[in-house]
Amino acid sequence: MAQLNGRPFPPGDYPIVVIGTGPGGLQVAATLQRIGVRHALLSEDEGPGGMFRRFPLFQRLITWTKPYAPHERRARAYEWHDWNSLLSAEPASRSLVAEEMDGTSYFPSRPEMEHGLAAFASAEDVTARYGCVWTGTAHREDGGFDVQTSDGMFSCRALVIAVGMTQPWRPDTIPGIQEVPHYVDVRGATEYAGRRVFIVGKRNSGFELADALLPWARSIVLGSPRPARLSVITRSTASARARYLQPWEDHVLGGGHLVLDVAIERIQRHADGYVVECSGTTRPGAFRFEVDEVIAATGFRAPLLDLPDLGVATFYGGRLPSQTPYWESTTVPGIFFAGSITQGAVGMKKHGNPSGSAAVHGFRYNARALAEHLAATYGSWKRPRPPVPPERVVALLLDEAQEAPELWHQQAYLARVVSFDPQPRDDGILPLEAFLDDGDTNAVAMTVETGPDGEIRPCAYIRRGGEIEELTLPDETIHDFRTAEHREMLGQALKGLI
């Protein structure tokens, strides 16, 4: 009956239940389906796309997809230039966001992104039970979970939460902020024509709003305690992206709009608008702004529902669940996370650089690795470990450092692993932290990382006799990591293993 009425995955018992059909949930489900692991994919939406069915409000994404690039569009290396499409073993299912773009910008529009995700779901034949709302979760005596939904009960051994960072969040330390509209409540830009606007927050959502309102608002103030930082400096897509810098330029050149480092002391509403009282942080001083509009661009949290009551530990003010290197709850085994929530598995954070897990170009690789981990843990799937000719090991690792999009998009976070047991075998792409924490087999993990001075270089982690040796290879101006020097250094370091 479920198939006849067009709604797959009827309530019942499944090895794995995945909640959410944004890019994280779709990537997990597509990978599980390819491997042949039975699962249920549930979504409260009416179709695929997740947050991209609604956000960003002003339509243009902050991550790029370049329809024309140095690599052929269906090739793995093209993922370097396409930060938004999902991953497939089938060339016809790759780079589908690029197929939807009209060429007016290399930042896809929100509809182009949504259509690209829908095209991926269709090409990969990923079905979901749409219109099915997750309402609660309970432990089972056998260690699994009962997942309560608007359609009935689903039972599973492993639960994957892929619902995004979509719940509006406001700090509870600012009197009055709970009474002002959040980013999600913003009206059309023209409705702010001639208005004085104060935006609380100076990260992407704050600058996105300011950029959209620049032609219309009479004045704009962006205020938060810490200085705004660019993503190219912090290596994080969560920081202000360069394409939103027009409001910043306007501030620097004295155009009438302001970007201020201020602590907001209180927000008071009155008949004609708001009064925002602030104190300077980088430059002391008291400031009082009378404005028509206040918008809280203060970020989002993961909608975890009742998971904290089950014991799922959180951090970052309760906004993210704490996770292992394989994106499993640190406190409730069997609950996993996919999508942007996987930024909660922070990795090594070498030189202070975060992972790329807050955005599609990073977490799509997490989702694929997670699905493979689930298939091996909760199914009968075994990871392919093809042999590598000994004389090819060094070349393989340097080729990956040169070209692998996984290593460039998830620097010092994901690694290409070759194990020696005793013959070399290719173990594929794995979380670096998991490699370092577990296992005693002799092996090498190759990563790419950005050093303290901004230099990009390969780094090999060599496990020999249970001990880890870290080998940082030279950076190179044009990112050529296959030089004679690189081959010699890595070959010498692997002597006795190959």
Image: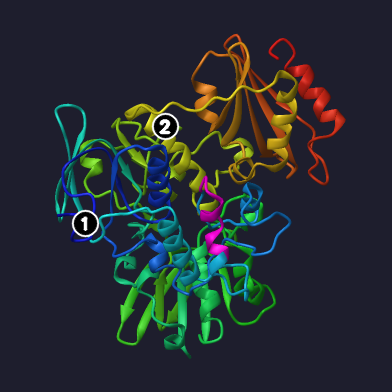
Secondary element at tag 2: helix
Q: Which residues are magenta?
A: 88-98
State left or right for residue 54 relative to residue 303: right
According to the image, what is the colour scheme of the structure? rainbow
- Residue 259 position within the rendered picture, expressed as x and y whole percent measured from the top left: 57, 70
Residue at image coords 39%, 80%: 187
Label 2 neighbourhood size at 10 Å, few (<14), some (14-19), many (20+)?
Answer: some
Q: Is residue 366 magenta?
A: no
Q: Which residue is mark 1?
A: 133
Query: Toward the viewer: 148 or 243?
Result: 148
- Residue 355 position within the rendered picture, expressed as x and y whole percent measured from the top left: 55, 43
Query: Toward the viewer: 445 or 341?
Result: 445
- Residue 360 position within the rendered picture, expressed as x and y whole percent measured from the top left: 50, 53
Q: Which residue is mark 2?
A: 373
> Which sits earlier in the primary sequence, circle 2 or circle 1?
1
Answer yes or no: do the residues labelled 2 and 1 have beta carbons within 8 Å?
A: no
Instruction: Tell me the amino acid under the disc marked 1.
Output: Val
Q: Quadrant of residue 344?
A: top left
The answer for how far apart the CA atoms under marks 2 and 1 are is: 26 Å
Mark 2 or 1: in front is 2
Residue at image coords 29%, 41%: 39
Query: Toward the viewer: 372 or 211?
Result: 372
Instruction: Tell me the amino acid under the disc marked 2.
Output: His
